[in-house]
Image (cartoon, rainbow, N blue to C red):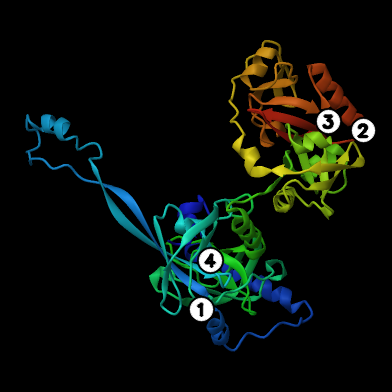
Amino acid sequence: MSPRDMSQTLQPGGPVLRGRGALHLLWVAAIGFALVIGQTLPSVARAAPESFADLAQQVSPAVVNITTTTTVAAPVAPRGPMLPEGSPFEDFFREFMDPGRQGPSTPRRSDALGSGFVISEDGFIVTNNHVIDGADEIEIEFFSGKTLPAKVVGTDPKTDIALLKVTSDAPLPFVTFGDSDVMRVGDWVMAMGNPLGQGFSVSAGIVSARNRELAGTYDDFIQTDAAINRGNSGGPLFNMEGQVIGVNTAILSPNGGSIGIGFSMASNVVGKVVNQLKQFGETRRGWLGVKIQDVTPDVAEAIGIKTAAGALVTDVPEGPAMAAGMKAGDVITSFDGGNVSDTRDLVRRVADAEVGKAVRVVVLREGRTETLLVTLGRREEAEATTTPVAAGAPQAPAQEEMLGMTLSPLDSDLAGELNLPADASGLVVREIDESGAAFDKGLRAGDVIAEAGQQKVATLADLQDRIDEAKEAGRKSLLLLIRREGEPRFVALPVE
């Protein structure tokens, strides 16, 4: 198996600079960096290590190669007579032999390679989920040349982590997790693994960036320029103390090979997942039970707060938050004693919290702070009961143009089509000016305006009143709660 090639697997991974333009950009960046350095005071920096040999010798016994074998069905091309094109028997044999469809299948064996590392002397091994996903057999090769079969203890596709177990007569060399949060951009790191099937290969580089997101809800990747190639997936990224601070998972590459942009899932994420897989065989993440969005500067201005921070609650379905009294329009500023910077921060904090724990959640509501005590549920159970929302095509007779949109009141028939309660109220967007601010903010025909200025709107007069109030208060924008296919979000629209 290979690290996920973002240009092919992560869909997409981002722009790839090519040719003279790319070289020019890098040159300009270097000049700019030199100018900045020339204007600042010198800082103390750690010297580059003379060699990584001692570190490699220390940790190598705990790094493993992983070979997986999968049985796949291979279609067998049906055999038939060779006929000249246009023969009158051609159609007959095409129907009889059915070559246009897959023929009968025979099983065949497919092997793939990856990397991993031992985390305990009794044989627990960490790797990527995509390395072992769907495998019938998993074989672990140790640095000594010894091989052992492995079984899957548990997997977490959301972070692409898998925990394996081997049985050994003797205690196994192992490595421990370090604190990925203390790693700084520019720190030295060393990667080990099985690139391109070469086995037990070492590469070194630095931390290029922190807190990278790729495609997952819980992503916290360390970016490194240490060479990572196909087969390195699941291998460890070490700090200079020989601690694992990341699991090599993905690369950004136009050709499948390393170009110096690799991503390792941070150990502080991996460690928590591994502990749960070891204890339960599955993950058990906390669940707050709210839908949220980031507080943008225009949203902050619309609701009258100075700092664009926290997580804005767009909806509170039945669950822990509703039971604690949380409401749509609340801004979550603190969770379990820690400040919340944005939605990503809140999602991670909640996921890391213990299921069933009662936590204090501080919200900003109508200019005042309130503290709620929320007993967290389990995310996996909540997701298992989630049902998809059906879209509707609204039609309503009465309408009026406001804020660059043609609006009409929501009735019970439209509410049913939009998968909303029969007594739901609001204004349906019938048409929208594509050159206006509402369109730029993402509103579209079929959206429902449920609230304006954090008050419910049922009629066009209600919306006009909220617009007038915003203008009288000296605000430049009005906060609207929009529902699309049942999903809520807040949008701040200019009223001037």
Label 4 or label 3, whichever comes before in sequence order: 4
- The local secondary structure at tag 3 comes to loop
**Residue at position x 78%, y 34% from top?**
322
Q: Amino acid at mark 4?
A: Ile
Left/right of residue 114 with respect to residue 409 in the rendered view: left
**Residue at position x 65%, y 79% from top?**
241
Spatial CA distance of label 2 from label 3 is 14 Å
Proximity of marks 4 and 2: CB atoms separated by less than 8 Å: no
Circle on res. 454: 3
Label 2 or label 3, whichever comes before in sequence order: 3
Spatial CA distance of label 1 from label 2 is 68 Å
x then y, percent, for residue 137: 39, 59
Relative depth, front residue between 112 and 176: 176
x then y, percent, for residue 308: 81, 48
Quarter of the image where the N terminus is located: bottom left
Badge 4 is on which residue? Answer: 125
| Res 110 → quadrant | bottom left
Relative depth, front residue between 75 and 414: 75
Circle on res. 61: 1
Q: Amino acid at mark 3?
A: Gln
Left/right of residue 264 with respect to residue 184 in the rendered view: left
x then y, percent, for residue 297: 79, 45
